[in-house]
Image: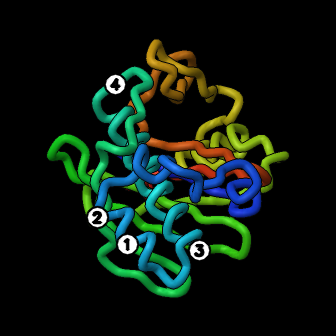
Amino acid sequence: MIGNDIVDLQAAAAQSNWRRPGYLQKIFDREEQTQIYQSANPDLLVWTIWSMKEAAYKARQRECGLTRNFYPGRFKCKILKQETSSASGKVTIEEREYFTKTLYKNCCIHTTASTSAGTGIFSEIYPSSANIKEILLERISSWKDLPQSLFSIEKDENFIPVIFFNKEVQGWAFSISHHGKFSAFSLPLMKD
């Protein structure tokens, strides 16, 4: 299973004051808080760890068919490798590990999470004005060489988006994310 999250850094700065008392304690464990306080760029690290948690949560929700239950303080993040334009890490949720890859763009952070460290993931980022669901269905239609008109995306009883082909649910993993001026989707690389 996969998940993804996008953070519009400008919107995050305007909408969330992570420096206010109690904010970090609700979302990050002590080790994560220490890393944030000691970071040369604490704003970027806050949103990197947040994005890791959100992407892993989406993968977990899809994997287990869970209802909405986002408690980020219970998720343990570890950044394994940090570079200027990317990071890789691991998020542990109830002893289950999710492997993350984060890309830093000019104005946003995009993170993908998967249940396997070796999962190849295809992602695209668009302005929020784009119809991300239609673009996603275009890609799948093209990859599967099937008419796009037979595909649709609807939410299941747990509000998890699922893909239908010819009115039948497909078990294809994917993830959609929106924040501020950006939208993104992610798919595991198709094998057939």
Look at label 2 and name its amino acid. Glu
Count of numbered tags: 4
Earlier sequence position, callout 4 versus callout 3: 4
- The 10 Å Cα crowd at callout 3, few under 14, some 14 to 19, many 20 or more, is some
Residue at point 71% right, 75% down?
106
Identify the residue at the far right of this view.
Answer: 129
Please report contact status of discs 3 and 2: CB closer than 8 Å, yes or no.
no
Q: CA distance from mark 3 to mark 1?
A: 18 Å
Please report contact status of discs 2 and 1: CB closer than 8 Å, yes or no.
yes
Mark 4 vs mark 3, foreground winner is 3
Please report contact status of discs 4 and 2: CB closer than 8 Å, yes or no.
no
Residue under label 2 = 31
Residue under label 3 = 104
Residue under label 4 = 65
Residue at point 61% right, 42% down?
141
Look at label 4 and name its amino acid. Gly
Mark 3 vs mark 2, foreground winner is 2
**Residue 114 percent location from the top left of the image:** 34, 53
Earlier sequence position, callout 4 versus callout 2: 2
Mark 3 vs mark 1, foreground winner is 1
Residue under label 1 = 35
- The 10 Å Cα crowd at callout 1, few under 14, some 14 to 19, many 20 or more, is few
From the viewer's perspective, is 121 left or right of 130? left
Q: CA distance from mark 4 to mark 3?
A: 30 Å
In which quarter of the view is residue 108 placed?
Answer: bottom right
